[in-house]
Image: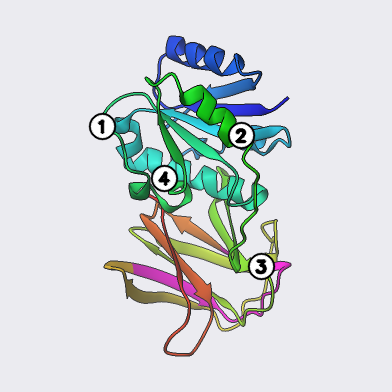
Amino acid sequence: MKKIWLSSLSSSKEEVQKTMASLQKYGLAVDGHFWQDDLDKMAWTAPRQQILDKNTSLWVLLASSKDLLSPSIRYGLSMLALTVQAAKGLDFPIIILQSGGEAIPADTLPTPLAGCDILDLSNPAYGAKIVAGIHKPIKGALPPYRLDVYGIPQIGQWFEIGPRDGIWSGALFGTSDAGPCLHTVGRSGQLPEKSTLQYPQRGLEIELQGRKFTAWAVQNELDSESSYYVKVDGHPDSILFSPYSSAEETEVFVLKLK
């Protein structure tokens, strides 16, 4: 049986139960939780394991327009989406059920959510559209980089980047409206306990797309099994990262998180 995870951002228990019952009529197993908007405690990590369960085929966000415009909620959803997409692929379906307010255009959402379908909860056809979304084949589109995030209260908030294929001669990572505070290099998929950094750089100032980024960098060689990890203090509006390069022009990736 296909399984859906439902995250309710502000709806009442009655509305959540009604929505779950509606989806269950389509033969779908529905489970979920009430979203906690607490970035300091990294509460966005709470449903990660349930969404990553092999039987979970779709993540549904039950939210109002007010929820979807809240910077802290947008950031938490972006972080959870990034770690889910790192494990399940960028095509893992995420659908927003908007429960009130003016419709939010999908292209105004943070980058990790920009491809979401937004459905009107008041339209009875939403159930059929969710069923169609859950059966849509996951193509697993892969960018040239790997990106994952970690939220561990005792250790902090970390971003992991590295090449999907090939070799990078180092890496650069920057944030806007927040700042890197530690960095390290190690095997992919696990924060290293210690490492040796080659030619580390801090406090690089970069201006791009009208934003100012503070970036750190290293020149450790990275492959598909090794990563650059950066701890960030605060909740950046956007992140910027790229392979390390001394050339005047290089490909840079920018993701909006709020």
Q: Which residues are magenta?
A: 213-229
Percent position of residue 93, x then y: 57, 41
| Residue type, mark 3 in image | Arg
Asked if residue 224 lies in the magenta stretch, the reply is yes
- Is residue 202 at least partly visible in the picture? yes
182 or 124, which is in the foreground?
124
Q: Is residue 170 above or below residue 124?
A: below
Tell me how the rendering is colored.
rainbow
Please name which of the two marks, 2 or 3, marks the residue nearer to the observer.
Answer: 2
Please name which of the two marks, 2 or 1, marks the residue nearer to the observer.
Answer: 2
Asked if residue 244 lies in the magenta stretch, the reply is no
Q: Is residue 62 above or below residue 177?
A: above
Q: Classify 10 Å Cα crowding around label 4: few (below 14), some (14-19), many (20 and above).
A: many
Which comes before the other along the chain, label 2 or label 4?
4
Percent position of residue 107, x then y: 36, 50
User: Spatial distance from mark 2 to mark 4, Cα to Cα?
Assistant: 25 Å
Residue located at (37% from left, 19% from top): 122
Snapshot quadrant of residue 195: bottom right
| Residue type, mark 1 in image | Glu
250 or 212, which is in the foreground?
250
The reply to whether callout 2 and callout 3 are in contact (CB within 8 Å) is: no
User: Spatial distance from mark 4 to mark 3, Cα to Cα?
Assistant: 25 Å
| Residue type, mark 4 in image | Tyr
Residue located at (48% from left, 50% from top): 112
Which comes before the other along the chain, label 2 or label 1?
1
- The residue indicated by pointer 3 is 164
Which comes before the other along the chain, label 2 or label 3?
2
Percent position of residue 232, x then y: 47, 57
- The residue indicated by pointer 4 is 75
The reply to whether callout 3 and callout 1 are in contact (CB within 8 Å) is: no
Dot 1: what SS? loop
